[in-house]
Amino acid sequence: MLLEYILLIIAVLIILSIVISRYTYNLGTPTLLIFLAVGMIAGSEGLGNIYFDDYRLSQNVGVIALVIILFSGGLNTKWQSVKNQITNAIVLSTAGVFLTAIFAAAFMYFVLEFDLLTCLLIGSIISSTDAAAVFSILESQRIKIKGGLSPLLQVESGSNDPMAIFLTIGTIQIITSPDSGIGSILLLFVKQMSIGFGLGFASGLILVQFINRHKFIYDGFYPVFLLASTFLVFSLASTLGGSGYLAVYISGLILGKYEFIHKRSSLRFFDGLAWLSQICMFVVLGLLAFPSQLIPVIGTGLIVSAFLILIARPASVFLTMVFSKFNFKEKVFISWVGLRGSIPIILGTFPLVAGIENANMIFNMVFFIVITSVVIQGWSIPKVATYLGLAEKEVQQIKSPIEFEPLRKTDRVLEEFIIPFNSSIDGKKLVDLRLPENALIVLVCRDEEFLLPKGETILHSGDVLQVLTDKSLIKEIYEKLI
Amino acid sequence: MKISEILTEKLISITLHPKNKDEAINQMIELADNSGNFIEIEEVRRSVFEREKLVSTGVGKGFAIPHGKTDEIKDVTASFAVLENPIDFDSIDSKPVKFIFLLVGKESLLNAHIKLLSRISRIMNKDEFREKLSNAKSPGMVLKLFTEEEQNYLDI
C-alpha cells in the first residue's frame, strides 16, 4: 500500500474517533468503547472493509501505547492525594489481581470445564483493571467520588498492570516449557518486580536531577527528552529481566512528585500523547477483532464476565481490604470499578504471538469480556456511585487565568496581595505604586471581576493583586501597599 | 461559591478569647477544622503562619484575614470570629483586631481563592457591616448577616 493511503486511513480513523467521542460524551459513553467501535466498523466485517489480522503489529502498537499511557498516568498522579492510599493500592494491585485471576480460573475450570492452563491464562489476562476509562466517565458526568476512593482507584489501575502482565507471561511460560518448576516462576516474579521497581525509582530521581542541571538549547527538547528516556527505562528494565511497565509507571510517579524545568508543558505533551496512544491502541484492537468470531463465545463470555463482575472482583476486594478503613458501601464501589480495558486485549494477543493452542478462542473471549465489562460497569458507574451515596457534585477546577511555569528552579513566585483598608494608595493609579523593577502586577481582582492591570488602573482598598515577583521582594511590595 | 456557603454556624464563633495573635490564629484553624475538610491540619497551619510571617494580615479597621493555600484540604475552608476583647494583631494601622476571617484555599483553585479574598475584604471594609457584626448575638446571626450582605453580589 502507498504511504499516502496508509496515512490517510490513520488520519481519518483518529479524526473520526475524536469527533464521534465529542458527541457521545454527554451520554456518558466510555470513550474507549467509541475508539474500539471505530476500529471494528472500519474493519473487514464493517463498513470500512479494511482487512487487518497482524497480531504482532497490534501487540507492538499496544506495548508502545501502554508505555506512554503508564508513564503519563504516573506523571499526572497527584502525590499528595495518593500517599495515604499507597498501602491499600499495593495490596489491591498485587494480592487483589492474583486472587481475581485465581477465582476466575477456578470458576472456568470447574464450571466450564476448560483445561487448567487455559483457565489460568484467561484468568491472568483479565485480572487487571483499567481506571483510565473510569475517570473519563466520571468527568463526563461531572461528579466526583468522595474521600480517598478516587486516588486509590487511580493508583490501583496504574500499578496493577505489571502484575497481570507477569501472571500472563508466567502462565505462557508454563505452557510453552512445561518443565519450568514453580521455583523458577517465583524467581521470575521477584526479578520482574524488584528490577522494575528499583530501576523505575532510580531513573525517576536521576531524571529530575538531570533535567534541572542541564539546560537544553530549545524548550521543545524537554518533553522529547522525557519521551526518549521513558523508552530507555522501559527497554533497560525489560532487558535486565525486570518489568518495564512497572519501571515506567514508577519513574513517572517519581517525576510527578518533584518539580523540574518545563514540567507543565511536559505534562501537556504527555497528556496529548497518552490520548493518541489510547486511540491508536483501541482502533487497532478494534480492527483486529472479527465480530463474527465473537458470536461463538457470547455464551461462555457472558457467564465468565458475570462471574468476574459479581463474584471474583468483589471477593478479592473484600478479602484484601479486610483491614482497610473502607466501609461496606465503599468496598462495593471499589468492586464495581473493576473495569477491564486495554491491557487484557493486548495481553490477549500474547498467546497468539506465542503460538499457543486455543489462542484464537482466548483472544475472542477476552475481547468479549472487556466489552461487556466496559458497557455494563462503565456505563453504570455514575449511577452506582450516586446510589451508594459516594458521589458529590464536582467543583469545577477553575485555574487562575494566569499560570506560572518555572523555567528553571527560581525564586520567582506568583503571589496574592490584599490592599489594606485606609491604604495610602487607595484611589491612586497603578503606575504610581512604583513597585520594584522585578515585580509585575499581572491581575487585579475586585470582587468577582478580574481587571486587566494597566498603568491607568485605579486601585482601591480591598483589591487583591496578583504579582509575579522574586521571593525576596515580597516584603518590600507589602510595604508599598500600606 | 459564596462566603455564606463556605461558612456554617459551627465555623463561626463569638466566644473566643485568645491572648495573642498566634493563639488567635491557632484557634481559628481549630475552628475551621470543624468542617472536616482538613486532610493534614499541620500543613494548613504551616501555610497560614508562613503567609503571616511576611506581613501581618491585619489589614486595618479592626479586621484580620489570615489565609493560606494548600492541597492538603478537601475543599475551600473558612472560619470567622468576632472577639469580645480585641487583641493586638500587629495590624497595618496598629489598631487591635476584633474580626478575624480565616480562609484556607486550594492551590488548584487559585482563581476562586483570589476572588474570595477580594470579596471578604470588600465586605469587611464596610463600616456599617462591621457595626452590625459586632452587635450579633450568635453564630447564626453572623451567618445571616453574611447571607444578606452577599445577596447583592454575584456567585463567584
Image: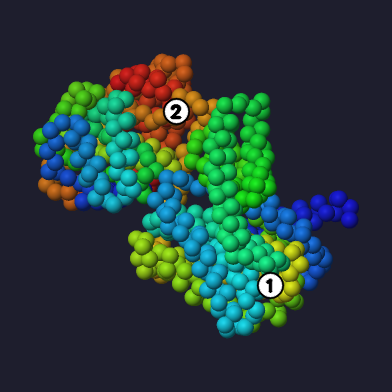
- Specify the color scheme: rainbow
Q: Nearer the viewer, residue A427 or A298?
A: A298
To which quarter of the image does residue A38 belong?
Answer: bottom right
Q: Is residue B110 visible?
A: yes
Residue at x-position 19% and y-position 40%: B27
Tell me where residue A387 appears, x and y as whole percent.
Answer: 41, 70
**Disc 1 marks which amino acid?**
Ile
Q: Residues within 10 Å of mark 1 (few under 14, many from 20)?
A: many
Split into 4 quadrants, where in the image is the C terminus of chain B?
Answer: top left
Compare residues A404 and A164 and report the one nearer the observer.
Answer: A164
Horizontal side of residue B135 vs A281, given as left or right: left
* x and y, in percent, of residue A102 in the image: 54, 71
Residue on which the image places disc 2: A413
Mark 1, residue position: A362
Question: Residue A187 falls in which quadrant of the image?
Answer: bottom right
Outermost residue to the right:
A2
Q: Chain under label 1? A: A
Task: State the image coordinates of residue A292 (x, y, percent, origin top left).
Answer: 75, 76
